[in-house]
């Protein structure tokens, strides 16, 4: 049987989640995606209307099939956590069962088990503010959406993950080096995500034989990255200064994720793997 993968954080065909889904599909995995509730309608209708068909193309010429799209809001663990104003919000009331616990329950009912969990989501409402000007709420929201969301997804999915399974998240070097502009507690959230990768690798490894790794990716012009506002500058900086002077493609990150999720990486867990044209290794720009 092929592996079954759930990719949380796919809302269009521009981001890392989409590219990872494609690389996993090309390697023979069955693809389930979790799509942020407010973006569900536009994603599903674009998919249905064939808007993504060009970017669904796999190397063998076939089109990636997404077996099922689940609405998801990873900042809520169960229905009791959802505030009234969100429940009443039109974009949310149109769908149901989108808290983490309910999504995992639905996947369990639909398919029984999972092999690969991918977390490709982040959100920081104050990302454009320096850390010194970030509010407590903004900081906690960044950590909730970008770090605890992974803890929660793994915690709920791991009981139905097959031994030998793997999980992967996406991080950014702003966790360990100063990247002015990546504010609002997002740098802190990525530091938490990387630390949690190690602790969860131990816990999920011992208890479930599941591996936990994170990819520290270079800059990509995704929807989320465009919202931060400095993505073109970061891409130019990387092209100018990295050991490999080419623009990073989402597919390169997708392929690294497919490797990490595969038995080829069976001894790799608790790792931060750089997929960034080597930029992380530079001490000064030249
Ligand atoms: P993206 O916009 O494709 O993905 C982010 C996704 O998160 C979106 O689909 C959005 O709908 C979803 N999302 C936001 N809040 C959510 C919530 N509460 N519940 C469920 N989904 C939610 O952008 P991307 O840049 O591909 O981001 C994917 C991951 O890659 C993120 O973790 C990001 O930090 C990381 N990353 C991106 C870059 C870059 O330059 N783009 C670099 C390094 C790491």
Image: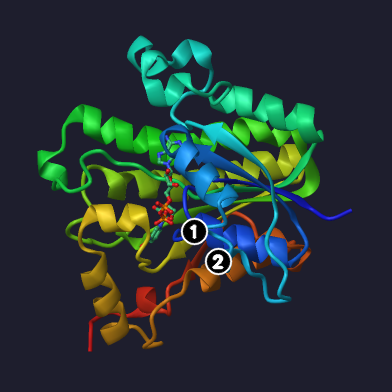
Which residue bears the numbered disc 2?
55
The residue depicted at 29 percent of the width and 46 percent of the height is 186
Residue labelled 1 has its Cβ within 8 Å of some atom of ligand 1: no
Residue 74 or residue 184, whichever sits in front: 74
Res 103 → quadrant = top right
At which x and y percent is residue 204?
Answer: 67, 40
Of labels 2 and 1, earlier in sequence is: 1
In the foreground, 130 or 230: 230
Decide: is 198 above or below 254: above
How far from the left and from the top, in percent, is residue 180? Answer: 17, 59
Q: Is residue 9 visible?
A: no
Q: Where in the figure is residue 140, as x and y percent of width and height?
A: 30, 31
Which residue is pictured at 70% across the width and 55% down the height? Answer: 65
Q: Quadrant of the C terminus?
A: bottom left
Above or below, 85 relative to 35: above
Q: Is residue 54 left or right of residue 148?
A: right
Residue 13 lies left or right of residue 59; in this view the side is: left
| Residue picked out by circle 1 | 13
Q: Residues within 10 Å of mark 2 (few under 14, many from 20)?
A: some
Which of the pair 197/162 is nearer the observer?
A: 162
Q: Quadrant of residue 126?
A: top left
Dot 1 lies on which element?
Answer: loop
Residue 164 visible in rendering: yes
Q: Dot 1, how many residues are within 10 Å of its Cα: few (below 14), some (14-19), or many (20+)?
A: many
The foreground one among 85 and 65 is 65
Is 283 positioned to the left or the right of 38 in the image?
Answer: left
Residue most extreme to the front: 49
User: x and y percent of residue 92 in the render?
Assistant: 44, 23
The reply to whether the C-beta atoms of the residues labelled 2 and 1 are less than 8 Å apart is yes
Identity of the residue drawn at 68% across and 76% down: 59
Q: Does 214 sit above or below residue 23?
A: above
Query: Residue pushed farthest left?
Result: 133
């Amino acid at each position: 049987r092929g592996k079954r993968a759930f990719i949380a954080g796919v809302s269009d065909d521009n981001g890392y989640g989409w590219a990872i889904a494609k690389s996993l599909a090309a390697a023979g995995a069955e693809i389930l995606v979790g799509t942020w509730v407010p973006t569900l309608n536009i994603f599903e209708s674009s998919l249905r209307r064939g808007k993504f068909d060009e970017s669904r193309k796999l190397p063998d010429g076939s089109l990636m099939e997404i077996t099922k799209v689940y609405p998801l809001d990873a900042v809520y663990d169960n229905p009791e956590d959802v505030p009234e104003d969100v429940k009443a919000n039109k974009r949310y009331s149109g769908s149901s069962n989108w808290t983490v616990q309910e999504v995992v329950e639905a996947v369990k009912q639909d398919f029984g088990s999972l092999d690969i969990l991918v977390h490709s989501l982040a959100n920081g409402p104050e990302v454009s503010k320096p850390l010194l000007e970030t509010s407590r709420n903004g900081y906690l929201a960044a950590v909730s959406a970008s770090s605890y969301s992974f803890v929660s997804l793994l915690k709920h999915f791991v009981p139905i993950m097959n031994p030998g399974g793997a999980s992967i998240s996406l991080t950014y070097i702003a966790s360990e080096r100063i990247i002015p502009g990546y504010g609002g507690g997002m740098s802190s959230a990525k530091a938490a995500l990387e630390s949690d990768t190690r602790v969860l690798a131990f816990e999920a490894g011992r208890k479930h034989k599941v591996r936990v790794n994170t990819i520290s990716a270079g800059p990509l012009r995704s929807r989320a990255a465009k919202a931060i506002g400095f993505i073109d500058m970061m891409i130019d900086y990387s092209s100018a200064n990295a050991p490999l002077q080419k623009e990073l493609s989402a597919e390169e990150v997708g392929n690294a994720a497919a490797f990490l999720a595969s038995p080829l990486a069976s001894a790799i867990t608790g790792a931060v793997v750089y997929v960034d044209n080597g930029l992380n290794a530079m001490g000064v720009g030249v």
